[in-house]
Amino acid sequence: MLSLPDFRRLCILKGIYPHEPKHKKKVNKGSTAPRTFYLMKDIRFLLHEPIVGKFREYKIFVRKLKKAYGKTEWSTVERLRENKPTYKLDHIIKERYPSFIDALRDIDDALCMCFLFSTFARTGKCHVQTIQLCRRLSVEWMNYVIASRSLRKVFISIKGIYYQAEVMGQLITWLVPYQFSHDHPTDVDYRVMATFTEFYTTLLGFVNFRLYHSLNLLYPPKLDAKTQSELKEEDEEDYAMDSESYIEKLSALSASLARVVSSADEEDAELDQFPVEGEDMEKMEAREKEQKQQEAQRKMFQGLKFFLNREVPRESLAFVIRCFGGEVSWDKSICIGSTYDVTDETITHHIVDRPNIDKQYINRYYIQPQWVYDCVNAKILLPVEDYFIGVTLPPHLSPFVEEKEGDYVPPEKLKIMALQRGEKPANEQEEDNDEEEEEDEDDEEEEEEDDNADEEEDDEEEAEEKNLKEMEDKRSQGKSLQVKVTPGKVKVENPARLEQEEKAEEKRLAIMMMKKKEKYLYDKIMFGKKRKVREANKLAAKRKAHDDAEKAKKKKARK
Amino acid sequence: MEESSSNVLSSEKPGKMKRTKKRSKGKEEEQEEQVFNFNKPADEGDDDDLSDSEDSVYSGLEDSGSDSEEGEEEEEEEESHGDDGEDEDDAEGEQSQQLQTEVKKKGSEGEEEKKADEYEHDSSDEEDIRNTVGNIPMEWYKDFPHIGYDLDGKKIYKPIRNKDELDDFLDKMENPDYWRTVHDKQTESDIVLSDEQVELVKRLQRGQFGDVNFNEYQPSVEFFSNEVMLHPVTNRPADKRSFIPSLTEKEKVSKLVHAIKMGWIKPRRVEDDSRGRYYDLWATEDSSILAQHKMHLPAPKIPLPGHQESYNPPPEYLFTDEERTLWEQQDPSDRKLPFVPKKFSSLRQVPAFPRFIHERFERCLDLYLCPRQRKMRVNVNPEDLIPKLPKPKDLQPFPTTQSLVYRGHSSLVRSISVSPSGQWLASGSDDGSVRFWEVCSSRCMKTVQVGGAVKSIAWNPNPSVCLIAVALDTVVLILSPSLADKQVVLASERLLAGQQEEEPSEGAGPVWSEAEGEELNQGIRLKIQHPKAIHQVAWHAKGDYLASVMPDHSSHLQVFIHQLSRRRSQNPFRKNKGLVQCVSFHPVRPYFFVATQRSVRIYNLVKQEMTKKLQANSKWISSMAVHPGGDHVICGSYDCRLSWFDLDLSTKPYKMLRHHKKAVRGVAYHRSYPLFASASDDGSVIVCHGTVYNDLLQNPLIVPVKVLRGHVITHDLGVLDVTFHPTQPWIFSSGADATIRLFT
C-alpha cells in the first residue's frame, strides 16, 4: 500500500494520468459523483516500479530518524543520516521518453518549471540545491540555444517573456518570469511542484547533455579558453566565490563555449542539389528560400555591437542578442562578463529604457529594448526611428498568432508584413492612415452588403405590398378613382446577384433537409464562425474608434 | 660482504629472538615479582637495585624490540658504529652518569615506588632522558649549531666536532677503542662502550640473555596448581580478560553481528555521486519500449499567447470600461481571458505577474490529475454536411412568388377552400363571414354573414355540384354559392332538395334543418345542428358524404358522417379513442382517416374495422392530408414537425421534417403535381417536392423547394391554412393578418 501523497508522486514521476471512463455510472457503481479513475493497467504498471521500494525505504528512514531524535541518540541519527536512501530517475526518463525526440517534445514544461524555480529566493520554499540545479540547467539550456542559434521568436507578455526555439525540428516554447521576488501564494502545494521539478531537472540534464554533444560542445559546459582567459584578466575584483563564479560567468551568456573538436567557424553544410523536376523543383526552391531566410535571420545582429544600460533586463537581452550573432556588453558593476565599456567607439546600438539620458555618444543609436524583440519577430532589422528614446513605442505584437482568413489583423502587423516583403514603408503616417481608412471602409461596405442581402428582398416585397395596399385603398375610396398610369420603373436585375441569391436559397433549403445530428454539428460550426467574425469586427471597430479619437486629439493639439 | 650477510642474519634473527625473549621475560618478571613480594621485608635495597637495573636495561630493549624492526636496525647501526671502535671519554662518562643518576633516583625513591613498580612493566612511554631534545629526527637540526632546547628554552649546542674524513681515518688507525665507539645522534657525541656493555651486546647477538647471572634453567615452581590458595598470587587488580564477559554485552554484540550478517546494518555508504551525473541516456534507442507506449497520450501544450497578452498590445485589445466590469463580475471559470490586458509605456514599468506561480501550479495539476482523452476533432467542411439534393430548378413547377393578396376579412382567416374547377376560392374568418373570391382577379364576389366565427370550410369536391360546407360553433351549414353555370347550380339544388328522409334523431344526434328567409337569400341551404362545437368538416371525394369533427375528451360522440343526399347522420365510432383532431376520407377507397392527438387511425368503412394505426412521433397533431394516390399521409403537429407516412412501408413516419420554427397549422397535397406544403405560425409556407413512385421499392423523394413568406404574424399566429389550386401549381394561404395570399 502506498500513501496518497506517495501515489501522487509516483503518478507524477511516471506520467500516469487518470482516465475518463466511457460509462461513468457503470464504473462508479451507479453514482455519478465526480471521481478520478485510473486504468487498471496503469496501476499494475506502477506496482512494478522499483522506486516504490525506495519510497518505502524513505518512509522507514524517516520513522527511524524520528525515533532516534526522540531518544536523543545522536550517533544513531548521524548513522541514519549517512545512510539516507536516495533514488535515481534515469530509468523512468528512459521509459517515459524512449527516444530523444519524445523528450524534446515534452521539454516545454520542464523549461518553464526550471526557469521559475531558478528565480526563487534561496530560502524557504525549497532546497537550495534544487534552486541551484535549476539555475545551472537553465543557464546551460540558454547557452545551448545561443550556441546553436536556434531561437526563433520572443514575446514580452505581462506574465513574463516567452521564447520559442526550434531544436531538432521541434518547436519549444518556454516562459521566463520577470526578475522579481515572488510573493509565494499560500494555496499552492509546493510538494507537487517540487516533485515535478525533481523529474524535470533530471530530464533537462539528460537533454542538455545530449544537445551539447550534438554540437560537439563540452558538457558540463566550459567557457572557451580564449574568452576565459580574457575574462579572468578583467575580473580581478572578487565578484563571487570560486564555486559560484563559474556558473555566474556562464550565466552572463557573453562568452562562447568550449568545443570538443575546435572547429574554425561552424558553417552549415550547404544543401546538396538533387536533380529534381517539376513540382519537386518548386518545393525544393521554396525550401531553399526558406533556409536562406532563416540563415539571414540567424545572422541578423551579426556585426552589431550592443550596450545594455543598467535598467534593461540584462539576461533576456543578452540572450536574444547573442542568439542572433550580436555582440553585447554591459556595465561592469551589473554583472560579471562584460566585454567592453560604454566608451567603446564601435558600439552601434545602446539599449536604454529611460525617458532621457544625460551623456550621449555620437554614432550610436539609443533605442528602447522592444526594438530587439520586434526585430527578432519580424526577422528583419526594423527601422530604429520608432524606437528611439522617449518615443511612444509601437505596439508589441505576439509572434505566435497566425492570422487565417477572416481573422482580425492589427494594422501594425500589416505594416511589418509589408516591410518583410520588401515594400517601402509609406512615406508619412498620414498616408498610412488613409490606407487604413480605406481598408476599413471597404470592410464595412462588405459587411453592410452582407446584411443588406437579406433585407433587400424583404424591402422589395414590402414596397410592392405598400403599392398594392395604396391601390386598394384608393379603389375602396370610390369607384370614381382617376385612373392614373404612372410610368413603371424598369427593375434592374443583376443576373449575378440573382444567381447568388438562388444559390443561397438552395443552400438554405438543403440545410433544412439535414439530419438532426448533422444539423447540430453544422449549426455549431457556423456559430463558431460567426462568433469569430463578430469578434474580428468588434476589434476593428474598436481600433477605428481609437484611431479617430487619436486623430481628433491631434487636431485639437494642432489648433 | 660480511656486513651485509650479518645484516641479513640479524634481520632474520630478531623475530625469533624477540619472541623467546618476551616469553622468558614475562615469566621472569612474574617470578621476580613474586620473589620480590615474598621477600619484601627482607632485603629491599638489593632487590630493588637488581630489578631496577634490569628494568632499565630491559625496558630499553623491550622498547626497541616491541617498537619495530627499525629500532633493531638502529641498534645494529649503533653496533656497527661500535665496530668502528671509537671512544670518547666524556661522552661515556656522561652516559654512565646518567645511568647512575637514574639508578640513584630509583633507589632513593624505592619505598614510594614500590607500588608504582608493579605497573612499570606496562608503561610504554619510556622517555629518553639524555637531554631534552625529545624523540625527533635529528636531521632537522642538521644545519644548526644546536640540537634542541633545554627545559629553560635555551639552546643545547652540539659538541664541537671538527673531524673530517682524514681525522676519522687516523682515529680508526690510532684509537684502540675505535671499535667500541658509538656515535649518539641525540647528543651528537661519541660514546665508548664499556666492557660490560660490549659483553651485553655480544650476548644479545648470540641470542642469550643479557644478564650474565640469569639462570634460564631454574626449576619451575607451580604457581597455578589445583590447590586453592588463600591469598591471591599478586596484588594486581584483575586484568580485563579475567572478568567474566557480560551477557548483555554479548547479546548486544551478537545482535549487531547478526544484523551485519543479514545486511540490516550497512557499512557507511560510499558517497554515490552518480545522482546528478548525466550521460547519453538515449545512446541506444530500442523500439521495444516504444510499443508499450502506444496508448500514452502526450499532454497538450499550453496555448500560445495572443496579442492581448503583450505588455504593449495594440489599443483595440485593451478592455473598455464595460468589458472590464463584465470581466470582474464573471466567475473566473467563465472568463474568456484569465487576465486583464494591460499596456505599459516601457518595459521598465512591467511588474511581476502575481499569478505566475498559480498558473504553473495549475498546469502541474492538469498534467497529473486531469483525465486525458483522445477527442476526435471534427474537422469537417460544413459544406460537406449539407446533403446533395436535386436542384429546385429541376423540380419545377412550384409556386415561387406571391402574386395576389385577397383582402377583405377583418379578422383572422381560419380556413380556405378552392372550388374543384379552380376558379373560386372560399374563405371563412373569425369575423363571422364567408367570402367568395375569384382566384384570378382577387375579387371578392360574395360575402355571406353567417353570424359566428367560421372554424372550417370545405368545397364539395364533386365538380358537378357547387356546394360548400361551413362549420361554425355547433352548426354545419351547407351553402350553395351559385357561382357556377346554371346546370351545376341546379344540380346542387336538386341534391339538396332530394329525398327528405326525416328520421327522428336518436338522442344527441345532429338535427337537420332547412334555412329560411334571409339566410336562404344568402345561399344557405341546410343547417345541421350538432350537440357540440365543431372543429372541422371534410367531404368525401364523391361529394355525398360529409364528416364533421367535434373534439371532446370524454365522449365517443366526436365524429359524425353525414350523407347529404339522404340527410342522414351517423356516428361511426362506439368508443372514445382519444381527442380527435381531424378526419379525412381516402380519395379512392372506402377508408376513413382519423387523427387523434398522437396517432392516425385508418378505418375501413365497409368492413367497419380499424386497419392501421400510424404513430406520428409527435406530441399533438394539428392537421393531416392524404396523398391523392391514397398511399401517403402527411401530418403536421404543433411541435413544429411534419411527418410523412408511407402506408405501405410502416406505421412509423418515413420522414420527419422539422422545417418550421413554430407550430404547423396546416398541410396540403397538390392534387396533380408532386407537391405538398405546410403552413406554420412562423408566418411561412414551405413548399416541398414529394415525388411518389409507382414502384413500391423506391422511396418517395422529398425535397423542400421554396419557403414562401408574406403573412404578417399577428397575435403570435402566422399562417392558419394552406391549400393548393386543383390544377395549377399555385398555392393559397390564409393568415392571422386577415389576408389570403396566392403564390404562383
Image (cartoon, rainbow, N blue to C red):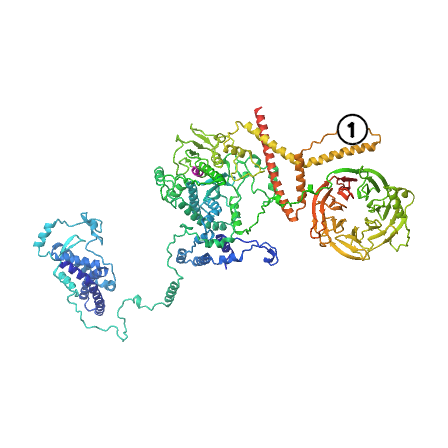
* Quarter of the figure with the C terminus of chain B: top right
Q: Which residues are magenta?
A: A318-324
Q: Is residue A323 magenta?
A: yes
Is residue A191 visible in the rendered structure shown here? Answer: yes
Question: Between B654 and B142, which is closer to the camera in this rendering?
Answer: B654
Find residue B308 and report its image quarter.
top right
For the stretch drawn in magenta, the main secondary structure is helix
Residue A346 is situated, as x and y percent measured from the top left of the image, at 40, 31
Question: Between A193 and B38, which is closer to the camera in this rendering?
Answer: A193
Which residue in the rendered view is the most extreme toward the bottom? B227
**Amino acid residing under circle 1:** Val
B324 left or right of B167?
A: right
Question: Between B476 and B586, which is closer to the camera in this rendering?
Answer: B586
Q: Is the residue B668 above or below the residue A361 in the image?
A: below
Q: Secondary structure at mark 1?
A: loop
B105 left or right of A493?
A: left
Residue B580 is situated, as x and y percent measured from the top left of the image, at 79, 52
List the residue tagged with mark 1. Answer: A485
